[in-house]
Amino acid sequence: MTEQEVVAKIQAALGDAQVFVSGEDCHLTLTIVSGAFLGKALLARHRLIQALFKEELASGSLHALSLVTRTPAEQAQQTGA
């Protein structure tokens, strides 16, 4: 699964998502910023994203995802904007 496919899948599910990708091959680190995370606990945010890639993770086309999930306000606070 390519980085572009990963980003497209997340943005299709979470229309306002900003996705930043690092890593290589099928071991990716994703930082996802979306209003959809507002009011959700960290575990719920991660489960939401992992559910999008259930088939890819099971088939091995994607081996590992490391996730950082933030609301827009959390991202602004993190970046000091």
Image (spheres, rainbow, N blue to C red):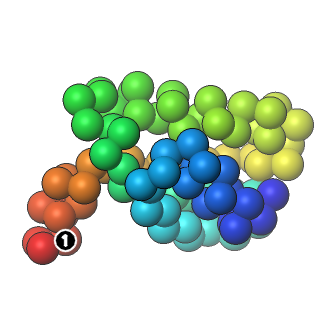
Residue found at x 30% / y 28%: 40
Give left or right: position of 35 versus 12: left
Q: Quadrant of the C terminus?
A: bottom left
What is the tally of numbered marks visible in this picture? 1
Residue found at x 61% / y 68%: 23
Give left or right: position of 68 versus 53: left
Q: Quadrant of residue 38?
A: top left
**How far across and down, in percent of the image, does residue 21 sit?**
55, 67
Q: Quadrant of residue 57?
A: top right
- Kind of residue at disc 1: Thr
Residue found at x 56% / y 54%: 11
User: Residue beneath label 1, please?
Assistant: 79
Q: Quadrant of the N terminus?
A: bottom right
**How far across and down, in percent of the image, does residue 22 sit?**
56, 70
Q: Quadrant of residue 25?
A: bottom right
**How far across and down, in percent of the image, does residue 58 sit?**
82, 32
Give left or right: position of 9 versus 79: right
